[in-house]
Image (tube, rainbow, N blue to C red):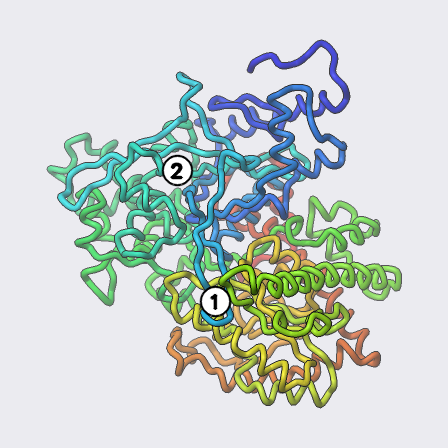
């Protein structure tokens, strides 16, 4: 590394220099040289045990969790005398902090998972794609509904994101090349440069690198460059297939050029399963020689697949049919090698349509473990894939507690010695049970909840006023009815019971369920004379017309709800949902709503994020809520509770049970309102909040989740790490 140390350093400058490291592919900022060398050695050691995590999307925005920025603030560092350090400091302090490389829960879960790997010091690297235009920005017009808007962002300006350099030619980027095949089966070379993002733990003494493949280089063919623009580009089946191959086919070249020696491959959904194709082909070359294609037998492929399976962990995230990739064989013939197509022909057969390759089927075939994301989802997955039932297990999802617990509540937790070390060990929250009747704790929490609610409601009120003033300035008609009222009638009041709903708008998630009989809903509110705020947010995929229709339904209901309730009920839609809005919502509402069609919500991590803040859930008994409900101690359940064998896995309107499940909600809702408003029952509501802290935080966190993954990885970890992992498994084991 270049010697940049002056003869004398201030304390601040000394700290900054200790955060600078020189890797084999460039200079990074945020961890010491010692930490970098240790992590890199773990990931490249031939005799080591590390894992590679493959995900189509990774959501880890720096405006919700940024240890480096926090460190700079705590030490009052705003600049440096050294030009290189100065550029890093300003970048981390000023951003931009948005990394639009995720579309929803799957990506956010991936980000949370990597943060916990870093916190627990598990040697893991991740691989994904870099999308030049991200997912999409959401504009919402009350007349039109959702409008998808391409976003522009700058990887070069984003903190903690580094373009890897060629060690031989340091002024040039490092890149890999991947052969594709055009429609004439002619080889076409695609090129990808490599960005590295660091998921640094809170103590800044470990990190997990994310390697993002950027195929936007001008040397690549135009159809490859187009595929690198938008996450989940479904403009054509071919575009989807190209994106999946860009991710999967990039794994081996990336490992080779960086020297990664991962012993386990973790597929976060089947999007990256093309990587397994190439591992199988590599095995065949090694065993049979370079001319293996001439003598290749099906038995050779099956043997190779069995060997490769020993290193693959597969997490399946949804029972919904649209979430499982299927590609026309004739289309895929133009994208992949002949041997790969032969492997797919054996292992990716679609039972319903022989003209398709089924990538979920392939992922199910070639692995050492199949992980579903809740106990209920395990049972559903076994029902869907009975031929693999013996190897399907449950590892219930979690969320990263340091990301999602609000600053106000974190300050409260810090002030009670019973919860000491909660930042490093979320299992410590089991001790919050002793604080259930502690008046100081209850008062402090209520003050923190009040602060979080005021933050959220102030944001919403400012948004409504801003939209009101934009009417004359833009062609966008404000998405909220309240923006059209007189300014004195607009504001929401923080003391009003506020329900939050935020997730991807898809038909099975039934965002409009509780408004199915709006007359009955408003009669409850007016009869009790209890005001209610309904805050909704979320995006529909640009190609999901039924999902976009649901957003329009929510917009169209606002005026009727307000008028029928005499202004007691206010429904607000918050556009352009992202992680920072999510954090405000899950910490600032008074109850979190989840109303999917059972059993199609495999997990539902937004409810876990609310539970991290003590917020009770009002939820269909689906996904994680089957485990987090605790016989009503942490919230409320509604809807039909029938055996899953009796439930169709269908999104058809006739199977969505609107009438039955909404009727159940209306029966429950008066009880919820009375607990919040009536002084006689208020203590019970606060009990539910605190119960979430000691019953759900120790369980539904990604530290516990990765402990279970480490069991399936069978990594040979250091004794100290093994002890930590075992302690989390003692608290809770998903598989029963």
Is 53 placed left or right of 448 in the picture?
A: left
Q: Which mark is residue 505?
A: 1
Which disc is residue 214 wearing?
Answer: 2
Q: Quadrant of residue 120?
A: top right
Residue 340 in the image: above or below residue 384: above
Q: Residue furthest right?
A: 439
Q: In this image, 392 relative to 696: left or right? A: left
Q: Quadrant of residue 386?
A: bottom left
View extreme (top): residue: 7
Name the quarter where the N terminus is drawn: top right
Residue 282: image quadrant is top left
Which circle marks residue 486 in the picture?
A: none
Q: Specify whether 315 is left or right of 707.
A: left
Badge 2, how many Cα within 10 Å: few under 14, some, many 20+?
many
Q: Left or right: 59 with respect to 700?
A: left
> What percent of the width, then of the height, locates residue 427?
69, 52
Is residue 421 something one can see in this rendering? yes
Q: Residue at x 44, y 19 (%)?
A: 170
* Circle 1 SS class: loop
Rendered location of residue 236, percent (x, y) = 28, 56
Question: Is residue 599 visible in this depiction of the protein?
Answer: no
Q: CA distance from mark 1 to mark 2?
A: 29 Å
Q: In the depicted view, which residue is nearer to us: 88 or 147?
A: 147
Precedes in sequence: disc 1 or disc 2: 2
Percent x, y for residue 618?
Answer: 63, 73
- Nearer to me, 654 or 425: 654
């Amino acid at each position: 590394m270049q010697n940049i140390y002056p003869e004398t350093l201030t304390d601040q400058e000394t700290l900054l220099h200790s955060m600078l490291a020189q890797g084999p592919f460039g200079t990074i900022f945020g961890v010491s040289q010692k930490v970098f060398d240790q992590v890199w050695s773990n990931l490249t050691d031939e005799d080591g045990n590390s894992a590679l995590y493959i995900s189509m999307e990774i959501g880890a925005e720096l405006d919700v969790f940024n240890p480096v920025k926090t460190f700079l603030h705590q030490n009052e560092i705003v600049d440096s005398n050294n030009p290189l350090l100065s550029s890093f400091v300003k970048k981390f302090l000023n951003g931009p902090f948005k990394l639009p490389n995720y579309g929803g829960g799957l990506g956010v879960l991936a980000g949370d998972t990597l943060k916990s790997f870093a916190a627990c010091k598990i040697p893991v690297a991740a691989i994904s794609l870099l999308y030049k235009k991200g997912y999409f920005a959401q504009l919402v017009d009350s007349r039109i509904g959702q409008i998808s808007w391409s976003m522009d962002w700058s990887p070069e300006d984003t903190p903690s994101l580094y373009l890897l350099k060629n060690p031989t030619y340091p002024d040039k980027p490092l890149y890999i090349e991947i052969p594709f095949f055009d429609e004439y089966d002619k080889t076409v070379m695609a090129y990808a440069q490599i960005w590295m993002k660091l998921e640094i733990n809170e103590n800044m003494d470990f990190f997990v690198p994310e390697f993002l493949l950027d195929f936007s280089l001008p040397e690549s063919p135009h159809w490859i460059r187009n595929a690198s623009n938008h996450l989940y580009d479904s403009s054509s089946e071919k575009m989807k297939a190209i994106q999946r191959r860009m991710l999967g086919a990039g794994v081996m070249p990336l490992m080779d050029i960086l020297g990664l020696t991962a012993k386990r491959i973790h597929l976060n959904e089947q999007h990256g399963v093309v990587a397994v194709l190439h591992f199988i082909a590599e095995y065949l070359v090694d065993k049979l020689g370079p001319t293996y294609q001439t003598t290749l037998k099906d038995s050779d492929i099956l043997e190779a697949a069995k060997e490769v399976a020993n290193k693959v962990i597969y997490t399946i995230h949804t029972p919904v049919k649209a979430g499982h990739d299927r590609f026309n064989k004739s289309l895929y013939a133009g994208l992949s090698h002949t041997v790969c197509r032969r492997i797919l022909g054996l292992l990716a057969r679609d039972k319903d349509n022989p003209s398709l390759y089924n990538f979920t089927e392939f992922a199910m075939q070639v692995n050492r473990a199949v992980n579903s994301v809740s106990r209920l989802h395990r049972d559903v997955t076994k029902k869907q894939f009975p031929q693999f039932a013996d190897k399907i297990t449950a590892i219930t999802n979690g969320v990263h507690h340091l990301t999602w617990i609000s600053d106000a509540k974190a300050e409260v937790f810090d002030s009670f010695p019973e919860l000491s070390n909660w930042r490093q060990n979320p299992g410590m929250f089991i001790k919050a049970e002793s604080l259930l009747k502690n008046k100081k704790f209850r008062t402090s929490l209520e003050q923190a909840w009040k602060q979080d609610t005021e933050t959220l409601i102030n944001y919403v009120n400012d948004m409504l006023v801003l939209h009101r003033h934009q009417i004359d300035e833009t062609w966008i008609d404000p998405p909220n009815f309240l923006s059209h009222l007189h300014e004195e009638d607009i504001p929401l009041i923080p003391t009003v019971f506020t329900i939050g709903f935020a997730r991807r708008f898809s038909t099975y998630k039934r965002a409009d369920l509780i408004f199915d009989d709006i007359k009955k809903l408003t009669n409850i509110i007016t009869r009790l004379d209890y005001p209610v705020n309904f805050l909704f947010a979320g995006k529909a995929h640009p190609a999901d017309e039924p999902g976009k229709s649901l957003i329009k339904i929510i917009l169209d209901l606002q005026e009727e709800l307000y008028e029928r309730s005499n202004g007691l009920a206010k429904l607000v839609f918050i556009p352009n949902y992202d992680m920072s809005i999510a954090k405000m919502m899950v910490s600032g509402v008074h109850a979190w709503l989840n109303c999917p069609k059972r059993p199609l919500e495999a997990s539902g991590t937004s409810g876990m994020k609310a539970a991290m803040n003590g917020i009770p859930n009002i939820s269909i008994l689906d996904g994680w809520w089957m485990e987090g409900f605790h016989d009503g101690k942490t919230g409320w359940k509604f809807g039909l509770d029938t055996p899953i064998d009796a439930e169709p896995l269908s999104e058809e309107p006739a199977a969505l049970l609107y009438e039955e499940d909404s009727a159940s909600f209306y029966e429950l809702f008066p009880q919820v309102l009375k607990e919040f408003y009536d002084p006689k029952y208020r203590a019970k509501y606060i009990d539910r909040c605190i119960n979430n802290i000691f019953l759900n935080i120790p369980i539904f966190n990604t530290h516990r989740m990765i402990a279970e993954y480490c069991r399936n990885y069978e990594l040979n970890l250091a004794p100290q790490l093994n002890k930590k992992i075992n302690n989390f498994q003692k608290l809770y084991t998903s598989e029963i």
